[in-house]
Image: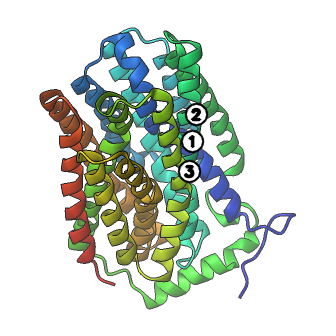
Amino acid sequence: MKLQFISKKNIYYGWYIVAAGTLCILGCLGFGRFALGMLLPAMAPSLNINYSQMGLISTANFIGYLISVLLCSLILKKITPSKLIFFALIVVGLSMIAISAAQTFTVIIILYFITGVGSGLANVPMMSLIPMWFSKKQRGRAAGFVAIGSGFAIILSGWMIPHLNNLLPQTGWRLSWQILGTIVLIIAVICLKVIKDKPAEITPACENDTVEKNNNNYHITHQYNYTKKNIAHLSAIYFCFGSSYVIYATFIVMSMVGDKGISENKAGFLWSMVGILSLLSGPVLGFISDKFSRRTALILVFLSQTFAYLFAALPLPDFFLYLSIFFYGFVVWSIPTIMTALVSDIVGPQKTASIFGLITFVFALGQISGPAIAGYLAEFSGDFSSGFLMAAIITMVGTFLSSRLAK
């Protein structure tokens, strides 16, 4: 049976949801979180911020994210996902613009905490909408295309921020915050116009389309016999990802500039390469998880990340730094993609939002601890290699946990 197409151009409306979702993730996570690594080299000397304080800035964002994940399921009982996404993006955009005027470390901590709250309130409902629009065989790929929004943000920030810093050495980072925040506000309006909460909002006929029938048929044959044990298993895997990938995202540019003596422009170019490579990470690994298994895809991702962190940590020739960038960028957004599909497989589309919110809470705990510990290790040792080594150990544990998943 064919999908029912519901737009004038004969394109299934679910793909418009995916396009808006890509923009949503670009704003709430891409700009709201991953641009920080490019902004820190200019912010740090301007505000006299040390290594441990850099880690605390990132940690404040993740504490906000953690709190928002706790509140998300309660808020979704009061308003629809589409409206929550809109209001959350407004919070992200305004807080980022406010950071541009900050004069002290304390103010930045508070504002970036608010950015984290908005990021979580936008990300969780956005990812949980995918199972409502796509059948089990397409969820991995659809979620993968949504996740690559962060890759586009990295490409833009890696090019724009060094350019503005060269033009305005003292205030370029402030202008960058303003521009990025304004873009997020524009994205909020687009998402409000495009995102619908379920197919029936477009036309009642969609209640009988392939997505609904596939989900209903799967529900009949698969009773979603999930247990606390396998939810805890998924949470542990997501924790390993959250506590490791963010160390690299926060400190790799600082490491290239401070530890390896690479110019900010070249570091920005390499960070942009992470963004370009990451455009493949969600769709490709999502396809592998759909075609083969979620377990196979997760093992591939964690192994790739382990190599990335080891190559960044060890005193190796520059060639291995480029390999590190490749291994990290090629898989970086794939685990949220796979986890979204995996949770939906286990608990069903109707419960995806609540269970995904639960494991995202544990994921957020990892994001809080990772950069804070890595920042203190860098302050103690004088470089970031110990933090990257810690990340590699965590991803080894993630590889083992993934291998224990049922096929």
Q: Secondary structure at mark 2?
A: helix
250 over 114 or under it: above or below: below
Q: Which residue is mark 1?
A: 155
Q: Residue furthest bottom?
A: 221
Q: CA distance from mark 2 to mark 3?
A: 12 Å
Which residue is the extreme one toward the right? 8
Tell me what residue is drawn at x 53 percent, y 26 percent. 162
Q: CA distance from mark 1 to mark 2?
A: 6 Å
Categorize mark 3 by other alpha carbons within 10 Å: few (<14), some (14-19), many (20+).
Answer: many
Residue at the (41%, 80%) spot, across then down: 293
What residue is pinned by disc 3?
A: 276
Residue 41 percent location from the top left of the image:
39, 24
Please state which amino acid type lies under the numbered disc 3: Ile
On-image quarter of the C terminus = bottom left
Residue found 52% across the figure and 47% down from its top: 273
Judged from the image, the secondary structure of the residue bearing numbered disc 3 is helix
Name the amino acid, label 2. Answer: Trp
- Earlier-in-chain disc, 1 versus 3: 1
Q: Is residue 272 above or below residue 393?
A: above
Residue matched to label 2? 159
Q: Are marks 1 and 3 in contact (CB under 8 Å)?
A: yes
Res. 236 visible in picture: no
Nearest to the observer: residue 293 or residue 251: 251
Residue 334 locus on image (x, y percent) = 45, 61
Q: Residues within 10 Å of mark 2 (few under 14, many from 20)?
A: some
Q: Decide: marks 1, 2 in contact (CB < 8 A)? A: yes
In the foreground, 187 or 177:
177
